[in-house]
């Protein structure tokens, strides 16, 4: 009897919450995380990996529950001094958070891959599960707007998601190679389940799916692939998911998300608030679990993780 | 009648103290500072310019009187987080100080010269006098030790000046061009005085003198060139000056410093403690001022600056 393996795809804050729950149920040899790096960007000469850091800080117990990004107990003296120097300050880098960016950038410059830099830094913070960038090759998410394509962080942070979205570009995604450690798990017969965490389908999950046609890998996988709805009652807990859906002219409800993934999906976890959508989604040929998906407490996170594993079976 | 001009060569903390005094007596169109960049180094991927920063923080009223380096009211959360990540931590970078290094590095990467980056950042901190790197080309001070040459900051900070010094190398100095703004002042007929601040002759002043044979420029200058002794009663106020002198087999007193500069020097400011050396130094053909050179208060700084201007005449 060999232990089954699981692979979780994740982006921002919601994804990291479920990832934390999963990490409480499965040991490191049974679970790895694949993280979106489409919104990585160079800022002040530093390589910033927002989604990796969100997961790292979450699993390390260092995440900031108030802001939803950055580290807990953070201070802002660097930013104050930067303001004094007249430098760019629209992207906030806390004093502690900065250590991550500086050290990551330094190690990348020596030629280390983002994978090894990330696993090394995560291990230093006591994290035992592998946090893997979707690719070691650069992929850059651009948001299409009526004024032209906009770098994701400029859209998300500087412009506070105000511009109307007309589409997305994942520059470099086709040429990027899937992280080889991820590919290894995808091809491993012990792989039992693939979980799409409740992350923004457009800018967190889609960039991962686009890397070297990972989406087709999922469609062809013998493992069960399930997704947790990032939408509850027509709203996202955090972030612009539903605003984007509306601007793209699609209905802002969970069933659209299920349909969006239906070519490779086996199961879908729907919030109890959206129980009325169960039949619609089941009619797509998906197994549906209806449960509470809102994650406030650690118990919520673990309980949703358990629902995912149950749905995988 | 045209206002006379002055040029001050400076390195570390002692030099910055006198520079502050000079800045209180002379307006920006009559005084510029030429700063050693031989101990600039790349650390954690950042361009650190210790002597420039010492002067910038001193003139901006932001220097840390306790440490003698870095900024006042500094915090250390970045360093704590860096320690947690297992990164290199022997060189301390305060949270506020870090803004300087990150922004400098960013601007240098865009192709700006160190001169324009420095004057820009100094201006942002309210400094009106020009703080000029000795050169925009890289010069790297190496300390020769029995174990081989050692990068200056490794010697100075990491090894706390413990290794025995057998000599120095200023890599790149011969090929480096003198800062063109400095050269302009050196050739200006209004230049009345050149002041060597009380900085380490080996690792603060010598690198400046080595740049494209600046030493010969000084020897040929019509301006009066004076130096303030960095040694009082056979000791340096701060730093390894006298330790280096002894290890190099020279006598650790002020007259050696005067002799070391005699090929281009017109005057020497000696501390009252060393009044007995006055005749020895005068016998080198130098005008000698004997005064208090210890700078504790702002008044001390201004008063020593005035003694310098008086000696220049």
Image (spheres, coloured by chain):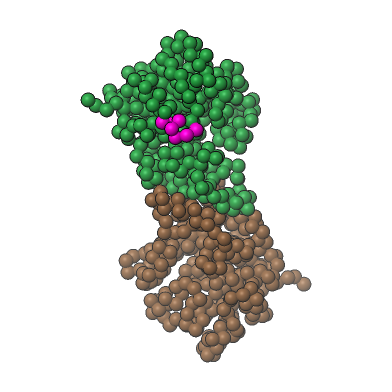
Chain colours: A brown, B green
Q: Residue at x 47, y 82 (%)?
A: A234
Observer-nearest of B183 and A15: B183
- Is residue B299 a member of the stretch shown in magenta? yes
Image coordinates of residue B60 in percent, x first then y, are 42, 42
What residue do we see at 55% from left, 40% from top?
A: B66
Q: In this rendering, is residue B60 above or below B302?
A: below
> Measuring 57% from the left and 78% from the top, which residue is drawn there?
A294
Furthest residue to the top? B283
Q: Is residue B295 left or right of residue B234?
A: left
Task: Give the quarter of the image for residue A197.
Answer: bottom right
Using residue B127 as the reference point, say whether residue A194 is left or right of it. right
Image quadrant in which you'd find residue A307: bottom right
Residue A278 lies, in percent from the top left, at 55, 88
For residue B98, above or below residue B40 = below
Q: Nearer the viewer, residue A223 or A144?
A: A144
Specify start and end residues of the magenta stretch as a single range: B296-302
């Amino acid at each position: 009897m060999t232990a089954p393996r699981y692979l979780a795809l994740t982006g921002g804050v919601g994804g990291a919450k479920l990832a934390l729950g999963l990490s409480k149920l499965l040991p490191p040899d049974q679970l790895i995380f694949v993280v979106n790096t489409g919104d990585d960007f160079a800022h002040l000469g530093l390589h910033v990996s927002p989604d990796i850091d969100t997961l790292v800080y979450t699993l390390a117990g260092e995440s900031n529950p108030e802001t939803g990004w950055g580290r807990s107990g953070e201070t802002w003296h660097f930013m104050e001094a930067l303001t004094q120097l007249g430098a760019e300050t629209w992207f906030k880098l806390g004093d502690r958070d900065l250590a991550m960016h500086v050290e990551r950038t330094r190690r990348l410059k020596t030629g280390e891959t983002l994978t090894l830099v990330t696993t090394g830094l995560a291990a230093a913070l006591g994290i035992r599960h592998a946090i893997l960038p979707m690719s070691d090759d650069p992929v850059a998410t651009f948001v299409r707007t009526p004024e032209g394509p906009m770098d994701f962080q400029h859209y998300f942070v500087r412009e506070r998601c105000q511009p109307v979205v007309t589409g997305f570009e994942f520059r470099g995604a086709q040429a990027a190679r899937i992280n080889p450690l991820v590919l290894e798990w995808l091809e491993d017969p012990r792989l039992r389940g693939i979980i799409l965490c409740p992350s923004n389908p457009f800018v967190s999950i889609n960039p991962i799916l686009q890397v070297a046609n990972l989406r087709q890998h999922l469609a062809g996988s013998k493992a069960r692939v399930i997704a947790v709805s990032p939408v509850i009652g027509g709203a996202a807990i955090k972030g612009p998911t539903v605003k984007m859906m509306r601007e793209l002219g699609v209905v802002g409800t969970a069933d659209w998300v299920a349909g969006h993934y239906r070519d490779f999906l086996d199961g879908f976890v729907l919030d109890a608030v959206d129980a009325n959508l169960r039949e619609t989604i089941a009619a797509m040929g998906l197994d549906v679990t209806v449960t509470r998906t809102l994650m406030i407490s650690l118990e919520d996170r673990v309980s949703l993780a358990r629902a995912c594993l149950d749905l995988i079976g």
